[in-house]
Amino acid sequence: MSGPARRVRELVSGSPLLTQTTQSGWILAQRALRSSKIKRHRAANDRLRVMIGSGPTRVDGWLATDLIPSRPDVVFLDAGEAFPFETGSVHRIHTEHMIEHVDHDIGRHMLTECARILAPGGRIRIATPDFDQVVALAGEVDPDVTALYEASNQRNGIEAGEAANPVYAVNRLFSGYGHRFLYTEDLLRARMADVGLADVTRYEVGASDDPELADADHHSDQIDDGWNRYQTMALEATKPLTG
């Protein structure tokens, strides 16, 4: 087992459910099902578009993958291992609020694999919490942002008298929800460029000049839309036509 793959296993240790579902027998079963799931999807779609870390999200025409598949159609994918797709076979990749759940080395591996499987001219969109936006919460922010983190604090069990303290929200975004590593825009741009991705561009949540990616963001289905828009950066990049 590779170093990144081993660390993925370590990331999910400690939770009874995740410990149970990541036992070797379950993983072998998921691997056995993976090829047939991918073949069925490719037979029904002329372009291969892959969601990495899809969680509960389902988008027509996209193949959903996750470490813990939540539906029969979701393909098992471990971000610390080689991805189960041929080099240059994927046209679009979308990964939303996933890369922050693995440590930096696994994130590097994940981006390397994304660049490998992308077809020349293919495009990737990564949405993830913005380190700088999170840190900014601890300083002076607009009243509307204060209202967003106060509401988030209260939704997460912080008493009303304490909810105005941004420290709770900051700590939750850095170490809650299974988060392992938050990126600044500059660092994520650099990691994407390191693996050969080009034309890195930032977009607002739900916005893109690529019709295939414009409607792909769905994290706001799970958390407050305003809070998601404040904390999230979305970067897109393209695999060059020539190496």
Image (cartoon, rainbow, N blue to C red):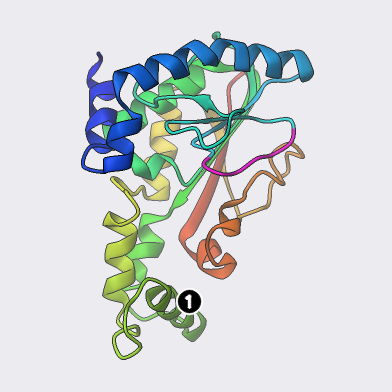
Tell me, yes or no, if residue 235 can be seen here: yes
Tell me the crowding category of disc 1: few under 14, some 14 to 19, or many 20 or more residues within 10 angstroms, Cα based.
some
Expressed as whole percent of the image width and height from the top left, the position of residue 55 reads 51, 42
Q: Is residue 204 left or right of residue 112?
A: right
Residue at image location 36% in from the left, 81% down from the top: 140
Q: What residue sits right under mark 1 in the picture?
A: 148
Please state which of residues 241 and 69 is positioned toward the viewer in this rendering: 69
Q: Against 101, is 151 above or below?
A: below
Q: Is residue 132 left or right of residue 168?
A: right
Residue at the bottom extreme of this rendering: 161
Location of the N terminus by quadrant is top left
Q: Is 56 one of the magenta-colored residues?
A: yes
Expressed as whole percent of the image width and height from the top left, the position of residue 19 reads 27, 34
Tell me, yes or no, if residue 46 can be seen here: no
Residue at image location 44% in from the left, 42% down from the top: 98
Q: Secondary structure at mark 1?
A: helix
Residue at image location 47% in from the left, 82% down from the top: 147
Q: Is 81 one of the magenta-colored residues?
A: no
Q: Main secondary structure of the magenta part?
A: loop
Residue at image location 55% in from the left, 8% down from the top: 86
Location of the C terminus by quadrant is top right
Number of numbered markers: 1
Q: Against 99, is 32 above or below?
A: above
Expressed as whole percent of the image width and height from the top left, the position of residue 52 reads 52, 32
Q: Is residue 79 left or right of residue 165?
A: right
Q: Amino acid at mark 1?
A: Leu
Q: Quadrant of residue 89?
A: top right
Q: Quadrant of residue 12?
A: top left
Q: Is residue 120 left or right of residue 190?
A: right
What are the residue bounds of the magenta stretch?
A: 55-60
Please state which of residues 157 and 96 is positioned toward the viewer in this rendering: 157
